[in-house]
Image (spheres, rainbow, N blue to C red):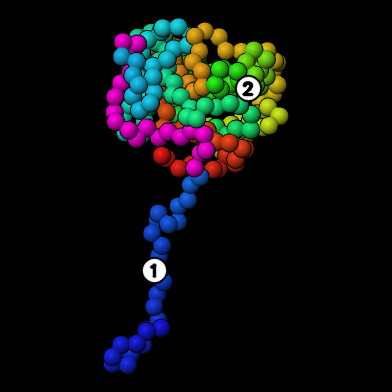
Amino acid sequence: MSCNTAGRCYRARPRPLPTSALTSCTTATIFSDCFGGTPGLINTGSPGPVQGWTFSQPFGPKGGNITFTPGLMSFDTIAINNAPGAQKQFVPPLLSALNLTIQFKFTEYPLVTGAGRFYDHFIVTTGATAFVEIFLDDTGFAEVACGLNNSADGYTGTWTPVSGATHKVDVTVSALNVPVLFIDNVSIPIAFSGTGFGLVGGFPTNCVQVSSTAAGAAGPTSSKIENFFVTAGNLPNTTVYCCP
């Protein structure tokens, strides 16, 4: 309570905390990107890097562009069966693919679903000794492969694609190499499908590698990634990560 010179007293009302003080986030310990750098474009003829990302197509030169605009990395297909991809190195080098949490937010191609359009996301250790792959396509197929290269375990399940929708994907890989998948904070059951999975093609090492394809779309179209995080340990799918 405070009083003025006339002897009138008032009880101070608490001031609301600013929004920034009410919002908390977790710093990803291994990798974080929200694409807040300088805009730009990478492709086969101009591979970059832009914002630390380099054009990369481990499954063959299928073309397309990667465009960086504030807060987004866009995968732009401009001809039939383009499959643009990009990779960004881990600093310091990633030595293990065990006991990790991966979260990213992506937007599907705004096209009719069911044509086999896919979204492929890799975490590859230094020397490509181990990896995690999160593969989603628009037929509803989902796969997580994780473990040592050429002896990784595969787990498959189903999800619900929606043309043009934005999704948050969370994957944990335990210290025993068992993955758990959430999409839009909904648990996606995945079942063991076999072992012996490995990286094929001209795969980069020690990086995040992302690619997608519009699978036969005749005209220009884009899918997008809004953020990507990798952190040590197994964190809840509700974790909110800090942008760098």
Q: Amino acid at mark 1?
A: Arg
Image quarter of residue 57: top left
Q: Which residues are magenta?
A: 27-45
x 52%, y 38%: residue = 29
Q: Position of residue 157 (x, y in %)?
A: 63, 23
Measuring 44% from the left and 21% from the top, which residue is drawn there? 87
| Residue 153 sits above or below residue 225 on the image | above
Do the numbered discs 2 and 1 sit on residues whose CB atoms are within 8 Å? no
Mark 1 Cα within 10 Å, few/some/many (few <14, many 20+)? few
Position of residue 78 in the picture relative to residue 226 (left or right) = left
How far is disc 2 from disc 1 in space, using C-alphas?
50 Å
Query: Which residue is denoted by mark 2 in the rendering?
Result: 146
The dot on residue 38 is none
Query: Which quadrant would the C terminus be assigned to in this image?
Result: top left
Q: Residue furthest bottom?
A: 7
Disc nearest the viewer among 2 and 1: 2
Q: Residue at x 47, y 50 (%)?
A: 24
- Main secondary structure of the magenta stretch: loop
Residue 126 sits in quarter: top right
Residue 214 visible in the snapshot: no
- How many neighbours does mark 2 have within 10 angstroms: few (below 14), some (14-19), or many (20 or more)? many
Q: Position of residue 243 (x, y in %)?
A: 42, 40
**Label located before the other in sequence (2 or 1):** 1
Provide the residue designation for mark 1. 15
Question: Is residue 39 a member of the stretch shown in magenta?
Answer: yes
Mark 2 residue type: Cys
